Image (tube, rainbow, N blue to C red):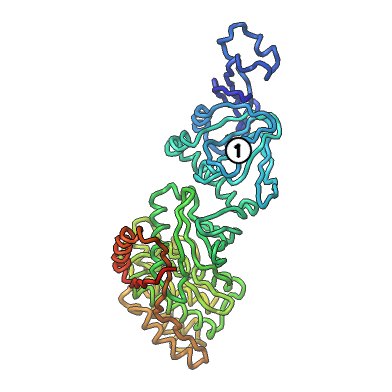
Amino acid sequence: MTLEGKIKNISPSASQAACYFLEIDIPREDLAGEWPASASQAVTDQKVPYTLELTLCSELTNTLSQEVIQALLRQMDFKRIPKGEHFIRQGEEADQFYLILKGSCIVRLEKDNMSYTLAQLGPGNLVGEMAVFTGEKRSAGVEAETDMDVLSMSRDRFEKLAPEYPEFRRYLSEIVTHRLSTSKIMAEKKIGKYTISEKIGDGGSSIIYKGTHSILNLPVAIKMLKHELAMDPDFIQIFSNEAKIIAQLNHPQIVRVYDIEELYHTIFIVMEYLEGTPLKQVLENTKKLPLTKTLDLVLQTCYGLEYAHKYGIIHQDINPRNIFVQPDGTVKIIDFGLACRTGSVDENFLFPGTIYYISPEQIKGDPVDERSDIYSLGITVYEMLTGTFPYPGDDMKSLVNWHLNEEIHDTYETLPDLPDEMHTFFMKSIRKDPRTRFRNVSEIIGLLKPLSEKLGVQVEPNFCMQQRMTGMFLVYQEHQRLPLKRLIEEFSRNVSETGAILKITQFEDL
């Protein structure tokens, strides 16, 4: 029999830090055969509940404020789960999660007629919270290893309380993010048509996983907005904006977006999987690059930027971290998280970009255009050739002052061995007034391409607009013809609005 009760009193423990003393009322008629006779005999009036005393110590109580802990615990119900009970079953809908007060349980994954033990959980641990938080079905089953005393909260109650206590939701989101990165769980994690296999990157706002298209067996990179940020509408908008912007772009020097999934209370951007390393890591290993290698990488980056700018997209964060170099030397521009339309003014960030490479107009909050990316590219190229920056110091105040007020020193003095074209590049890209910079990336290509050819570096744009075709077969019976005809006509109109062409061919009976 499963015992149930309500929390009567909660108070911080006088002897143990970050612990709480709980008094829980248990209906006396439910005690028969469960606890010692003394418990039910202490008071003859059967209407008076028995008070169970327990101590709760948990990472949860150590992380959240006392006010939040007390408010949340009062919204939870007490249960006693008998040894051997499977109180969470794999594949079922998640209706509640549990906080263990006493006893232990085993988490098991059933796969291919095999049972895998994933974890043993005891006092202070949460169990079942991941599915409640994400809205997915249970990814594993849980069995009581001993008799267990737990507090439980239903999904409905959690959904009502989460907005009121964002501190608690943020804590749960961190647990979910951690478990998404655990190898045993990852083997079972599905994101739409994709299966996540491993974590490959972790940034301030997102985590990147390696995955595979379940049907095509195509490797992909899956960028997940961290759950705590998925609670912020502004971050959701920024993250979604990145996906929508890159999805419009189809160029060999720009990372491709395949899909966007909104699952588990967050957003996933599915992109092409890239082998290689960011330029930043290359520079950390080699400090500076030869002129020929620099020209190769810069011209490829310019072709990608030229294409993006042609469609009115400003990257806003060109720097060595966002220039990815593949094993064959091919460059991919990545991370369009701050990208915007030409002429935009960013109102979400104090400095939209990386401070070492940011343009003066970005700092001042003025409208940005392709010349902002050109400024950042100029500083990036300077770092590639010298292993340093064109300004002294690295504290915030001096950096901002340099970007706003100090022109770059004559590079003939600091870099006397460079060809004239490179001096011109620096003196016309790293200028404080956008009107004195190159007007567009095409001008940079026109300056540097002849130099690269003279030095034996052949960098040609290998991009052309390709038409793609997708085939579908619609098999139907005669009585379905008329309703399907209406659906096809509507579908054809929607396709035409995108600029694509729908061609329909009728086949004889199969």
Looking at the image, which residue is at 41% across and 74% down? 469
Q: Is residue 274 above or below residue 138?
A: below
Looking at the image, which residue is at 28% across and 65% down? 493
Residue 77 in which image quadrant: top right
Task: Pick the quarter of the image with the C terminus.
Answer: bottom left
Q: Nearer the viewer, residue 187 or 113?
A: 113
The location of residue 198, given as percent across then percent down, is 61, 59
Q: Is residue 462 above or below residue 347?
A: below
Secondary structure beneath label 1:
strand
The location of residue 297, given as percent across then percent down, is 50, 79
Q: Is residue 296 left or right of residue 446?
A: right
Looking at the image, which residue is at 63% across and 26% down? 80
Q: Is residue 286 left or right of residue 259?
A: right
The location of residue 288, given as percent across then percent down, is 57, 77
Residue 227 showing in the rendered view: yes
Within 10 Å of disc 1 (Cα), the crowding (few <14, some 14-19, many 20+) is many
Q: Is residue 509 above or below residue 451?
A: above
Q: Nearer the viewer, residue 417 or 361?
A: 361
Residue situated furthest bottom in the rendering: 454
Location of mark 1 (residue): 88
Looking at the image, which residue is at 43% across and 81% down? 463
Residue situated furthest top in the rendering: 44
The location of residue 208, given as percent across then percent down, is 54, 59
Residue 23 in which image quadrant: top right
Task: Pick the quarter of the image with the N terminus.
Answer: top right
Total marks drawn?
A: 1
**Residue type at mark 1?**
Ile
Residue 432 showing in the rendered view: no
